[in-house]
Image: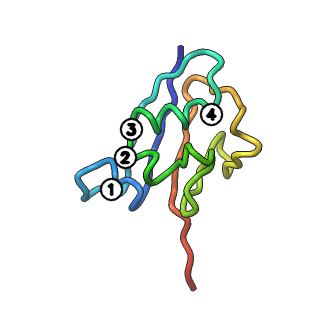
């Protein structure tokens, strides 16, 4: 058993807090052999706001306005969904910014 640190930034964090903060961080335990995909689906079940603003478990994809950082790189669900988690890893969820 291990744990990953999950941080949710900017307006995405509003769904998890009372507001007034720009990030929400928590430790999430996982079982040996668990993948990033398993974790995302489990978080949707355990934390309804996660499914509302970050990961669409019905379609197995991030919501369109969300990016993530995994293993110090821009995340790619095609590449990373089946990767096994390691104890102490950090996963960051960030909104996509657009504009001029």
Q: Is label 4 in a helix, a strand or a loop?
A: helix
What is the C-alpha distance between the residues marked 2 and 3?
A: 13 Å
Residue 24: mark in rendering = 2
Say which label, 4 or 3, has the lower sequence index.
Answer: 4
Q: Sequence-wise, which precedes: disc 1 or disc 3?
A: 1
Instruction: Say which label, 2 or 3, has the lower sequence index.
Output: 2
Q: Is residue 70 left or right of residue 88?
A: right
> Would you name the residue on which mark 1 appears?
14
Residue at mark 4: 36
Tell me the quarter of the picture where residue 63 sits.
bottom right
Mark 2 lies on a secondary structure that is strand
Judging by the rendered image, the residue that carries numbered circle 3 is 47
Answer yes or no: do the residues labelled 4 and 3 have beta carbons within 8 Å? no
Q: Earlier in the sequence, mark 4 or mark 1?
A: 1
The residues tagged by marks 2 and 4 sit, at their Cα atoms, a distance apart of 19 Å
Q: Of the residues under marks 2 and 4, which one precedes in the sequence?
A: 2
Single out the mark in the foreground, 1 or 2: 1
Q: Mark 4 vs mark 3: give the one in front.
A: 3
Crowding near the residue tagged with mark 4, few <14, some 14–19, many ≥20 C-alpha atoms within 10 Å = many
Label 1 to label 2, Cα distance in Å? 8 Å
Please, which colouring scheme is shown? rainbow
């Amino acid at each position: 058993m291990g744990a990953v640190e999950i941080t949710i930034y900017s307006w995405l964090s509003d769904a998890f807090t009372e507001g007034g903060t720009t990030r929400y961080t928590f430790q999430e335990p996982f079982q040996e052999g668990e993948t990033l995909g398993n974790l995302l689906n489990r978080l949707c079940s355990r934390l309804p706001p996660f499914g509302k603003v970050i990961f669409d478990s019905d379609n197995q994809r991030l919501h369109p306005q969300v990016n993530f950082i995994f293993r110090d790189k821009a995340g790619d669900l095609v590449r990373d969904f089946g990767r096994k988690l390691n104890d102490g890893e950090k996963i960051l969820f960030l909104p996509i910014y657009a504009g001029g």
